[in-house]
Amino acid sequence: MIRLFSHLQSSVGKKMGLAMTGLGLVVFVVFHMLGNLQLFEGPHALNGYAAFLRDMPIVLWGVRIGLLSMAAVHIGLALQLSMRNRRARPVEYTIHRYRRASIASRTMAISGMALLLFVGFHLLHLTAGVIDPGFADRRDPEGYRDVYGKVVHAFQNPFMVVLYLAGQLGLGLHLSHAIASSVQTMGFEHAALNRLLKAFGPMIGLIVVLGNVAIILAVFLGIVR
Ligand code: HEM
């Protein structure tokens, strides 16, 4: 334990911690999108799936505590690393040369903050039911919590559609750099693997964003009602 903490004090250890917690959060985001796609199968499928998850409180709370811890460590390490980088280079360069850096890699801090704001809003909206509480505790005719009704109600509102689409932009930008760079940080360096990651990392991000955008637009356009 003491060795783990002293390893986390070094820049390499912090980067490893950032990469591992980031990849853990990516796994959640992929499974969350796949679960939410059950909206296209109708209320029975989505509400039954949500009830199935809630019926296992130990698993549910284990996942929630795991997610919260990973997010806290991820954000804490990202802040420490960016402060350490600034301290190491106190005078800003007058000419910025971003020859090989992509837009996504240069905007990781901004997309990360946008994502944090989005997740905070999303939890208050669809999990806690603090924002737009009318649908928070509704039941469907089978007696399940009406998660389907809640999502459909949300994306019939253009304001929510704009907010959620903006959240997807932050998510897409963040993931398109994060996945490949995390795997490399963890020491998997090989010319062929690097090429593969450069293609697959952004592709995973794109698939997650497309799945989420499909849900938002399918409701907004009245395809799912
Ligand atoms: C169109 C996109 C999305 C939809 C339709 C959606 C839908 C939902 C719904 C309905 C819930 C509440 C489930 C319930 O009450 O049983 C939820 C919870 C949650 N969502 Fe999303 N979500 C979306 C995108 C995201 C994204 C991009 C993230 C993270 C980056 C995210 C993170 C979470 C988290 C952390 C929870 C709490 C899980 C829990 O209750 O334990 N969601 N989402």
Image: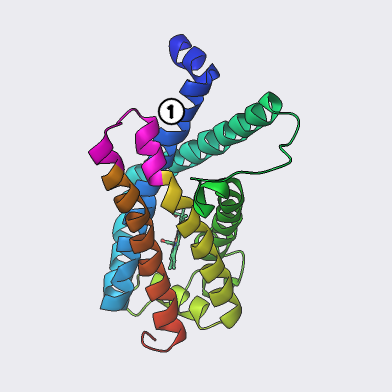
Residue visible at 47% across and 22% down in the picture: 12
- Residue bearing the label numbered 1: 16
Please tell me whether residue 204 belongs to the stretch shown in magenta. Answer: no
Please tell me whether residue 187 belongs to the stretch shown in magenta. Answer: yes
- Locate the C terminus by quadrant: bottom left
Residue 179 horizontal/vertical position (percent): 38, 45
Residue 87 horizontal/vertical position (percent): 70, 26
- Locate the N terminus by quadrant: top left
Q: Which residue in the rendered view is the most extreme toward the bottom?
A: 222
Q: How is the image coloured?
A: rainbow
Q: Secondary structure at mark 1?
A: helix
Viewer-closest of 201 and 37: 201
Residue 177 lies left or right of residue 90; in this view the side is left
Residue 20 lies left or right of residue 80; in this view the side is left
Residue 213 lies left or right of residue 27; in this view the side is right
Range covered by the magenta-colored residues: 179-194
Residue visible at 41% across and 64% down in the picture: 209
Viewer-closest of 22 and 15: 15
Magenta region, mostly helix, strand or loop?
Answer: helix
